[in-house]
Amino acid sequence: MTAVVTNIDRTRMLDLIEDGAQVVDVLPEGEYTAQHIPGAINIPLKRLDVEATAVLRRDKPVVVY
């Protein structure tokens, strides 16, 4: 499967989350701990690689912010 990167607006993001999309927060751990979207998982941008993303389901959309 090929990844498709698309910029979306807030409304589309909320729709995707409501429909079960996975949410990945790429902020450093301290910033993630301070505040993040409920249910988001933290994979800091510096660690965003194949191994780190192995925890994501391939059958669900992924929202990265």
Image (spheres, rainbow, N blue to C red):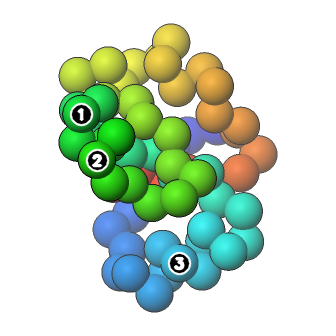
User: Disc 2 on helix, strand or loop?
Assistant: helix
Residue depth check, mark 3 versus mark 1: number of the one nearer the observer: 1
Query: Image height check: is 33 above or below 21?
Result: above
> Which of 58 and 36 lies nearest the eye of the viewer?
36
For badge 2, the amino acid type reads Ala
Q: Residue at x 42, y 35 (%)?
A: 42
How far across and how far down the image is residue 59, in percent?
A: 76, 45
In the rendered image, residue 29, in percent from the top left (x then y), is placed at 29, 30
Position of the C terminus, as image quadrant, is bottom left
Asked if residue 5 can be seen in this view, the reply is: no
Q: Which residue is mark 2?
A: 34
Q: Does dot 3 land on a helix, a strand or a loop? A: helix
Please, what is the three-letter code of the amino acid marked with disc 3? Leu
* Of the pair 4 and 14, the residue shown nearer to us: 14
Residue linked to disc 1:
30
Residue in the image at 39% along x and 63% along y = 6
41 left or right, relative to 6:
right
In x, y percent, where is residue 63? 48, 56
Q: Earlier in the sequence, mark 2 or mark 3?
A: 3
Q: Is residue 17 visible?
A: yes
Quarter of the view holding residue 43? top left
Q: Which residue is mark 3?
A: 14
* Residue contact at pointers 2 and 1, CB within 8 angstroms: yes
User: On the rendered structure, is 2 left or right of 59?
Assistant: left
